Amino acid sequence: MGTRPKEGTVLETSKARVKPPSMYKVIVLNDDYTPMEFVVIVLQKFFSMSREKATQVMLKVHREGMGVCGLYPKDIATTKVEQVASYAKKHQHPLQCVMEEN
Ligand code: TYC
């Protein structure tokens, strides 16, 4: 009881004092064992890339060692990293995915 403001009370409008949420890059890492086709499937499945885009990103990772899959709020980035780890484990590939604050 008594949690409601009194009638006629003016509630202060909240000013935009809050920062937008930090964003995180999800990065896939190269290794010597995961098949290229598997990486393409992962990029399509978890990062909604077209086959063409997924192939480009996979080849960039293969040549340069790492590549950005996307930029997400913290909880979404965490979920993507976990999903990739679990899917790679299930298929017994060492594919690694990490996140980094942008
Ligand atoms: N380097 C791997 C191979 O030659 C392919 C690969 C690409 C693995 C991207 C991981 O994130 C990766 N089979």
Image (tube, rainbow, N blue to C red):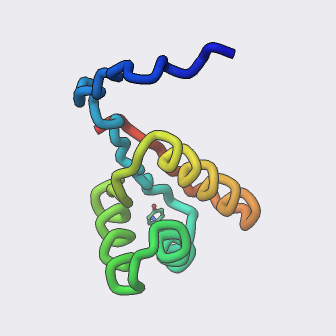
Q: Quadrant of residue 13?
A: top left
Q: Furthest residue to the front?
A: 8
Q: Residue at x 54, y 77 (%)?
A: 41
Q: Is residue 25 above or below residue 60?
A: above
Q: Looking at the picture, how far across and down is residue 92, in whole percent?
A: 72, 62
- Taking 3 as reference, is 7 left or right? left
Residue 18 visible, this angle: no
Q: Looking at the picture, how far across and down is residue 96, in whole percent?
A: 54, 51
Residue 53 visible, this angle: yes
In the image, 49 versus 87, the foreground residue is 49
Q: Is residue 40 above or below residue 82?
A: below
Q: Quadrant of residue 14?
A: top left
Q: Is residue 32 above or below residue 73?
A: below
- If the image is split into quadrants, where does the N terminus sit? top right
Q: Looking at the picture, how far across and down is residue 28, in whole percent?
A: 43, 55
- If the image is split into quadrants, where does the C terminus sit? top left
Q: Is residue 99 above or below residue 69?
A: above
